[in-house]
Amino acid sequence: MSCNYAEGLSPYKHKGKLGLPEKFEPVDKLKTKCELLALLINQSKHVVVHTGAGISTSAGIPDFRGPNGVWTLEKKRKKPSTNVSFTDAKPTKTHMILRKLIECQKVHFIISQNIDGLHLKSGLDRKYIAELHGNMFIDECNLCKKQFIRNSPVETVGKKCSGVPCASEHMGGRPCRGRLYDGVLDWEHSLPENDLFMAECHSSIADLSICLGTTLQIVPSGNLPLETVKYGGKLVICNLQPTKHDNKADLIINYYVDDILEKVMNILGIEIPSYNENDNPTILAQRMVIDWTVERQNVLALDKTFKAKTKGIKKKRKLVKSKRNSSELSINNIEIDVDSKPKIIKLDENDTRQNYPTYCNLPHSQQKPADMLVTSY
């Protein structure tokens, strides 16, 4: 089904680097890095997660730039052998973990490039997510801009009109003469204003940004994690392939995202929830109208928090692009080996857990490991 989505997009040559080599951490180093990530999460006050296509591959939805990605194989005139429909795809372990971490207030916001609707199906509340490239399970009114959840994925891509009248009247609102359009962006479309605003604000407020399953090649979404760095926060990248911003990261973990987060949850002592269809609003949408619009009061409250946080702080530069676009990634400018990066946390077999807060340069480095809530230590 993601193949159909890719085919529905307008022709576009600059899709970034495709098929970059994947790398897997040795078991011992993976364990140590997951412990570091858990520690960073515990010691951070505002954690933002940036998600890409790599978190949905275990649901049977191919990514785009991986060795067997849609665009990688497209150049060879092939298609992925596994391609589950958006209708049948279910949230992965990562999707359910992220929802749980939101509920536990360990993660405070999610910024997603994915259009597959799996964050939605997991039961995640709208106020905790920015969907920068749209959602196959969302319709939007062209007049009042309200968004509504569908019970099946849209059949079109690129904000095309379905001819269906706006459903705002059924939500107790005023009658609207608008028509519903699919909410999936094509290359030339500007990103949704409220989603982009929330994404920029949360990225700037965050003292920790975690990137999961994305090579960060599409802008402006791929540059948002740098907002955290510009304001003095930490950046963690979890991906099998090298990314555009590896040299800016404080920690890189090359492994399957599901496995990384499962280990982190075990360290944190938090149970991983199972997917429950009763929490899936796309199923509920079969018998009722469900609003998925960003609430204005949440935007205003975030704006107030953002201004208070950044008052008197001048960041190095501002994001200027608001349209979806790709950014070239040069493999020659990327040091794939984590231990060779000056800004990456360098792991040594002789380092002990007692030293983690020091060489992580964490905001609360004065705390001792005994003061942490990491239950497996």
Image: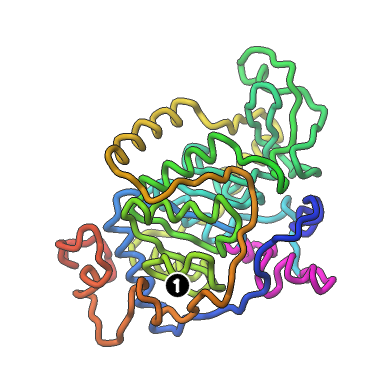
Name the residue rendered at 71%, 35% in the picture.
286
The magenta-colored residue range is 54-81
Q: Would residue 56 be counted in the magenta stretch? A: yes
Residue that sits furthest to the bottom in the current view: 350
Name the residue rendered at 39%, 30% in the picture.
301
**Which image quarter holds the C terminus?**
bottom left
Magenta stretch, main secondary structure, is loop
Q: Which residue is mark 1?
A: 253
Residue 66, by quadrant, is: bottom right
Towards the viewer: 44 or 370: 44
Expressed as whole percent of the image width and height from the top left, the position of residue 17 reads: 65, 69
Q: Would residue 142 be counted in the magenta stretch? A: no
Residue that sits furthest to the top in the current view: 174
Q: Specify few, some or many for label 1: CA neighbours under 10 Å numbering under 14, 14-19, or 20 or more.
A: many
Residue 60 visible, this orientation? no
Say which amino acid is labelled 1: Ile
Towards the viewer: 258 or 325: 325
